[in-house]
């Protein structure tokens, strides 16, 4: 049982490590309902292990604090009521120190449980908890970035020295795929979320996908060509959103004295034209693709194209905390930016959500969201697979989302 | 050219016939942004012929009133600015009489054009205009129903005598389909919208679909079983919507002194348990299906199951203006209620929108909406096909939308 | 009884005469919650006589239509529930013809009552009803102006030929008043609303008021001097409102190709610099006064200055339907524009609202509104007195409201 | 200069002392736009001295951090732009430690200035700054109470042991005042805000005011008599607000298992019927008075009645942090609760705001607010006078506001 203990401790420790250079005030920010305070993420992930691992599998387990069942339940209606999501930053109590103590108590109880039993169902739930925590670690970084960005002082999160302006990205070209009957979805060994299966065949025409993500420089051409002012490129809902929000450029871009800047977790930086454009909505991605005379890939195309590649890339493990310019020969399917697909997040044929409250994890969100693929510079490498289906709403921009172009042959 | 002339005149006359028993005040109601005044529909459909038929194909055509280009443009950004959609009921001028005169001037100009030329592209555009008008005729009835419903007097639109309570609907059973490689989408002769193509193959597992629509009686069991109060049956967004809007039953249902009633275009009527439930959102449809242990069909499944049936049923041509109980042996694929599918409204592989402003018709809405199939009691029979893809947002309820259950075998 | 019969018939007929050149669609517009459809005003004023005159004073009076008690009750909680104010334009039924028939039935019943009895309390209630109707006649014109203005066709209500540009307004000067102990408020014979009493003494310092209203030309100087962009002139709430609504000029002003225009009931006209500025909020009035180095009068000052003047001026009786330039020697205390005072609408010392539902007329509005004085070009002369206290919220602009400057000596 | 130094240091220290038992997270809460984080109050009051004392009076003074001119400017348009008020809790940086350091730097600079000069205008500005800080100290407590209240854990701010349930309040009776010509407003020596003058005469009828504030027990009778459900007692705007917010009781009251509780800075406590009702809006105060057959006093009546009393009472100096039951013979004009008057916050005759940005302090708020008098248990005794005019909007409830009844004789 050494391995699983160690992995558990490592994942849990990393959540706290993300906060080590932050103040308690930093950790309690919530600039919009979608971005929870980091402290809340820390408490929620402890509550998850308490609720879905300790309570079912540890005899006579008594929760640390019954009030936490309401405060730190995200959306599990099967468990009970939830403190309103948009008010999470109003929870100054429990304080950061109490939340860390709560985590450590839960950690100790989990390790005690692991010492006593190796029941398979328990171990599967533990693994689910670790991947759940990995998702929240990614959210901690993307939420923090959004929350800090509201401060005109443009706070610096990471003291990582700014990378030297990166060499030019590899030249853009398109790679042909023959289409036909392909298979997508998870099957066999190894962890996957329920929404990644069943593996199933699909028939698709021949297609092409770009060899890398769209860069800031390429997207700037769209901006400067009036792309945000021309409805011809936009989906109707996207155009409406762009007008209502007065969008003129990606979320973290800004113009100061005629020069373009981009806010990063390392602070405000001059816009690096070689790195992938990030933090665009599906609407912006789709409008860019239309302007470029291309389109976004479907998730079938994406998975078909990506499946042959190793799951390596610019993940959070590299601690760059920002997308990198694509070197020649590297296709960026994994890491850097989540890639919008033009596929709705809906069940695969034959999908069935698991029973119980933990099943609320994925299935109930299969509605009006879009699928993103490949992970980003904020994702952990161990957490990403070619079959991984992430999902956000079309207008969402605070995730590290980018663009890969596709086309018919 | 006699036939097309006659068809044109018949379709155009029917729009006006819909208003013949209404006052000018009735025709100018707009209870929510989505429901336009009937007068506006009348003017917009004239503007459509003026803009997309007369202006391109009639030499030196001068529009009746240049201001109408703004007032009666719905969403064609390629044409120009639009009067705000949510304010259409503020247009008391032009009055109903002026709008009818405008229509007749356009009609005369179209007939004159038809007398001079039979150019194929022009005829195709004319046919598009007639189907466009058929869509608006359906909206006129659904919008009117919603608009009149806001009046506590429950106004009667149609003097059709209420049908005798209908015999029991056919017993519910499920019909097996083998799945495999199927083809969907329009190809070949006959009119279809661009979004119905290209025809293409899909691989699907075996499935089953119900032999008829879900009835009011069946849906009432869901209501009385607490279906609206149990999040386990609902998509997350649907549950949020149901809470925010305090939904307790379908749009037009109400309870008076313990009895259930339903508002119809014939006025308020006691709820007829045998007829299909109508005016439910995708969320309600999906929650009902979950409660019933079933699911909604995908659009591929629906088209596969429906393609073998003749396009007949309870359409607006029958003037019932309300769904009817399914007689034994009639599967209700066409007419009665639009059927929610669990498919997003997205482009088929290889879809390309046509060039020009008229192309804004379909493609730019391929985002976060869901596909509905089969037409309703408010649709014209000539307008509906097995391949026809209608689309609305998941929360929408003012269309005549119903539920067909599906399942794996 | 001849006189009161005649007066009743004349007032009632005038409400209908206001609509004679309008369509039923025009009469059912409601562009914001505060502006009711004219048809609703017609029905509500009939309901007022039915509810407060016929029901209490006519034995066995049965209302024409019980549903009207909800549909046409404005805000009398003592009577019962009210149809939502902001949805009045959704009442296409009863139609304009039915509402006129309803009025005529009520008229007949009132005349019958008058033929039978001359009880003093009944006659007082009748007089109240006539003044209530006069108020609604004024609202019909101001609401209509606002509602028609939303139409980019700038509809014309009155065929009155545009007045020739008016001679220059009288030169501006200030008239001294000695202050001291003055008396304001209604006492003695003649109709007045309860809120005009009791008459009571007040001590005020010497003051000065302008000899006429501020003109369009004077207000234009404020606009062109950047008055709307300089917070120093504005009340804090006014500045917030001006920013939130992006105000740049009075409600009905607009600029076309560099020239200023003003919407009137006679259509769009070039801005006449000599006539009083109208349709400004208290905030705009107050900001203008601050820019001019002056202030607004209090209601005590206003009444003290106005009391000596005859109640004559540019009232609706003159049918100009627009403010007029002040001839030399005419101080414009009455008619033209309601004059904002810097006094809150609060009870006079010793005020007591009458008993019963009819007492909801005035007292319950004594909160956060401001007092306006003097009537406007939309008020009936018989309806206005020096003691008359009108009241609106500080941001309101759709009434015909203008500015008289005041100052300390 | 010893005295003013000491007073300055004492006032400044007290602001920080208020936070000593709070975490940085507690100090950064903002549950609604009106309630600023305590950290922001600390920084803003330092900025006030920097901007209005050090910059004008200290030669070559350079602000600590130019960005603070935006971040910590509340509403002084004359100084420049302001960070959005409703986003103040998004400022995790500068942290609490940095803000305290900023305060201490400003303190040192002020003391240095005081050591060099005793210019009268400078000393007046210093005194203004101290009263400004006293106001913010009161806001710190009322804002904190509101912000902590959002947390279902009902956090405890002060470890003060709960007072024993207090003896019955003095019996209610009314004290006659003869009215006539009275004088109100500040004149002569001693600090006062500009809005308290000029002192001026007013003529008022005889009146009576209650010998103490309305108690929780008395207000509970109103609640249990259906006071919140009966529009007859309410101002129209108050009724609308009560319906829209679904008000059923004062802000901090709640019912748990049939018993009434009240949230206080000492945590949740059973409702003490003897102490004054607090945290009611003007609307609630006015509705209660109407139910009781009385009314609220005007500010003239209040000042006339209060002027004879010494400014002593349950102020923050007593550290009770909650209203106290009125002992017999103590009229509670000062301390305990701010008392709503039925007077609008408008300028006294002859009022002129001072020149410069600091004049934005009072005058620009003279609009739609109501006057409150007498200070509360959160006010500092040195800060309150009989002529002191506080002002809030009629719906506001988060201040410690109570009710004194008045009546005609």
Image: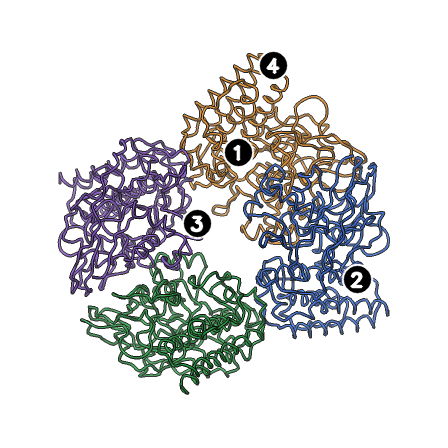
Chain colours: A green, B purple, C orange, D blue
Label 4 sits on residue: C118
**Mark 1, chain letter?**
C
Mark 3 → mark 4, Cα distance in angstroms: 53 Å
- Residue C293: horizontal and vertical position, in percent? 70, 47
Quadrant for residue A354, please give it.
bottom left
Label 3 sits on residue: B246
Residue in the foreground of this view, choosing between D232 and C393? D232
Quarter of the picture containing the N terminus of chain C is top right
**Discs 3 and 4 carry the same chain letter:** no
Q: Is mark 4 on a helix, strand or loop?
A: loop
Q: What element carries label 2?
A: helix
Given this view, does label 4 or label 1 mark the residue nearer the observer? 1
Rendered image: mark on residue C80: 1
- Residue B304: horizontal and vertical position, in percent? 18, 57
Quadrant for residue B319, please give it.
top left
Residue in the foreground of this view, choosing between D389 and B168? B168
Asked if marks 2 and 3 touch (Cβ < 8 Å), the reply is no
For the point 55% across and 44% down, which residue is it? D243
Rendered image: mark on residue D127: 2
Q: What element carries label 1?
A: loop
Mark 4 → mark 2, Cα distance in angstroms: 69 Å
Quarter of the picture containing the C terminus of chain C is top right
- Residue B248: horizontal and vertical position, in percent? 40, 48
**Mark 3, chain letter?**
B
Please identify the residue farthest to the front as the structure is shown: A60
Q: Is mark 3 on a helix, strand or loop?
A: loop
**Mark 4, chain letter?**
C
**Discs 4 and 2 carry the same chain letter:** no
């Amino acid at each position: 049982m050494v391995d699983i203990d160690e992995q558990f401790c490592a994942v849990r420790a990393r959540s706290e490590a993300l906060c080590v250079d932050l103040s308690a005030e930093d950790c309690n920010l919530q600039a919009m309902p979608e971005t929870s305070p980091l402290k809340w993420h820390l408490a929620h992930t402890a509550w998850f292990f308490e609720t879905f691992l300790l309570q079912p599998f540890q005899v006579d387990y008594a929760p640390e604090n019954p009030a936490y069942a309401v405060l730190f339940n995200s959306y599990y209606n099967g468990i009970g009521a939830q403190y309103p999501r948009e008010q999470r930053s109003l929870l100054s109590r429990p304080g950061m120190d109490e939340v860390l103590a709560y985590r450590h108590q839960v950690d100790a109880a989990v390790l005690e449980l692991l010492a006593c039993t190796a029941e398979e169902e328990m171990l599967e739930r533990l693994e689910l908890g670790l991947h759940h925590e990995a998702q929240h670690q990614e959210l901690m970084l993307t939420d923090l970035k959004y929350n800090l960005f509201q401060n005109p002082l443009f706070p610096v999160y990471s003291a990582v020295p700014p990378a030297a302006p990166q060499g030019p990205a590899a030249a853009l070209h398109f790679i042909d795929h023959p289409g036909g009957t392909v298979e997508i979805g998870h099957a066999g060994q190894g962890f996957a979320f329920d929404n990644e299966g069943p593996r199933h065949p699909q028939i698709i025409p021949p297609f092409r996908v770009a060899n890398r993500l769209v860069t800031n420089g390429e997207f700037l051409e769209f901006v400067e060509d009036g792309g945000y002012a021309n409805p011809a490129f936009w989906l109707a809902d996207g155009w409406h959103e762009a007008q209502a929000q007065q969008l003129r450029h990606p979320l973290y871009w800004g113009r100061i004295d005629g020069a373009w800047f981009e806010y990063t977790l390392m602070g405000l930086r001059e816009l690096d034209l070689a790195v992938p454009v990030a933090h665009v909505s599906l609407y912006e991605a789709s409008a860019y693709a239309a302007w470029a005379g291309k389109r976004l890939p479907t998730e079938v195309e994406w998975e078909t194209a990506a499946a042959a590649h190793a799951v390596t890339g610019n993940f959070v493990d590299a601690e760059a905390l920002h997308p990198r310019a694509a070197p020649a020969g590297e296709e960026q399917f994994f890491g850097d930016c989540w890639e919008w697909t033009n596929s709705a997040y809906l069940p695969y044929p034959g999908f069935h959500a698991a029973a119980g409250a933990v099943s609320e994890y994925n299935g109930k969100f299969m509605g009006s969201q879009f699928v993103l693929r490949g992970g980003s510079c904020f994702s952990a490498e161990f957490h990403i697979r070619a079959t991984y289906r992430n999902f956000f709403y079309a207008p969402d921009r605070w995730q590290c989302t980018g663009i890969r172009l596709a086309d018919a042959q």
